[in-house]
């Protein structure tokens, strides 16, 4: 995850894309935990981002911004956009902040980062035999999270229905999505993002999120 190129040219749009990626992942964590269901296209986008390490732009990590519709909508509501007609979800806020904290701790452990990178490469070889959302791929990504990020504190406690959380496939999906959320948090930090910006520059981030789908001009990374 950490091996991605450093993003030298930052923009509010880039940071909004990274945050949308983060909120898309944690929203799906919530959906799987509560209902056992998730949008397959959104799932594919988040899982693919884990493998898009050497990306040419922030947007290309997710293919393009049209694949972050779920995340963009959640981001806007979390920032208090009245146009969404949706209230803030404090559970999603808690997940997102916890992921950001864990990402900073992960960044300070080179050996664990290497373990994450090695796990991703092993999972990448499986893509030669299985589609991205196959249970074997998801299980491999879940294992990476369990063996690395999940050992850090504070441990993320996912709330949901017992019948869904007790399902091994759902548990793997949740862990794989939490890994995708960590990947988005890495991207957010590389774009110059930090938790204080969400608090003190909320309107700026919100405006970038509103414009995200309209402004499709690529951002080159050097």
Image (cartoon, rainbow, N blue to C red):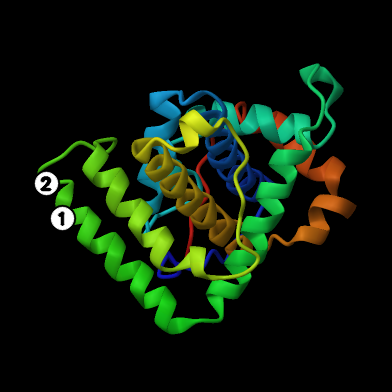
Residue 6 shows up from this direction = yes
Q: Residue at x 50, y 81 (%)?
A: 109
| Rendered position, 218 above or below 186 | above
Q: Are marks 1 and 2 in contact (CB under 8 Å)?
A: yes
Q: Residues within 10 Å of mark 2 (few under 14, many from 20)?
A: few
SS assignment at label 1: helix
Q: Is residue 183 above or below residue 217?
A: below
Q: Nearer the viewer, residue 167 or 200?
A: 167
Q: How many marks?
A: 2
Q: Position of residue 96 (x, y in %)?
A: 67, 49
Give the residue drawn at x 42%, y 42%.
Answer: 171
Secondary structure under tag 2 reads loop
Q: Nearer the viewer, residue 190 or 46?
A: 46
* Residue at mark 1: 125
Q: Quadrant of residue 87?
A: top right
Seen from the viewer's position, the closer of residues 31 and 60 is 31
Q: Gap in Å between the C-alphas at discs 1 and 2?
A: 6 Å
Which residue corresponds to the image point at 60% horizontal and 45% vertical from the top-left? 158
- Badge number at residue 128: 2
Residue drawn 57% across and 28% down? 34
Left or right: 196 as drawn, with respect to 157: right
* Residue located farthest toward the right when viewing the structure as drawn: 200
Of all residues shown, which one is farthest toward the left?
129
Q: In this orientation, does residue 51 appear?
A: no
Q: Which mark is residue 109?
A: none
The quadrant of the rendering that contains the N terminus is: bottom left
Relative to 122, is 151 above or below? below
Q: Position of residue 152 (x, y in %)?
A: 56, 70
The residue carrying pointer 1 sits among few (fewer than 14), some (14 to 19) or many (20 or more) residues within 10 Å by Cα, namely few
In the rendered image, residue 21, in percent from the top left (x then y), is placed at: 55, 43
């Amino acid at each position: 995850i950490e091996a991605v190129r450093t993003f030298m040219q930052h923009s509010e749009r880039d940071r909004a894309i990274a945050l949308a990626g983060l909120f898309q992942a944690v929203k799906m964590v919530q959906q799987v935990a509560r209902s056992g269901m998730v949008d397959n296209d959104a799932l594919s986008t988040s899982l693919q981002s884990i493998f898009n390490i050497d990306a040419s732009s922030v947007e290309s990590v997710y293919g393009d911004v049209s694949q972050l519709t779920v995340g963009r909508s959640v981001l806007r509501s979390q920032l208090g956009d009245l146009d969404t007609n949706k209230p803030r979800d404090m559970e999603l806020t808690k997940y997102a902040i916890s992921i950001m904290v864990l990402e900073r701790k992960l960044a300070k452990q080179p050996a664990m980062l290497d373990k994450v990178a090695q796990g991703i490469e092993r999972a990448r070889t499986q893509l030669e035999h299985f589609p991205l959302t196959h249970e074997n791929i998801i299980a491999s990504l879940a294992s990476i999270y369990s063996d690395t990020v999940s050992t850090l504190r504070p441990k993320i406690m996912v709330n949901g229905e017992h019948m869904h959380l007790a399902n091994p496939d759902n548990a793997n999906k949740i862990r794989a999505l939490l890994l995708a959320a960590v990947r988005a948090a890495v991207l957010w930090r590389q774009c110059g993002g930090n938790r204080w910006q969400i608090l003190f520059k909320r309107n700026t981030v919100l405006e970038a999120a509103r414009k995200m789908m309209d402004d499709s001009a690529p951002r080159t990374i050097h």
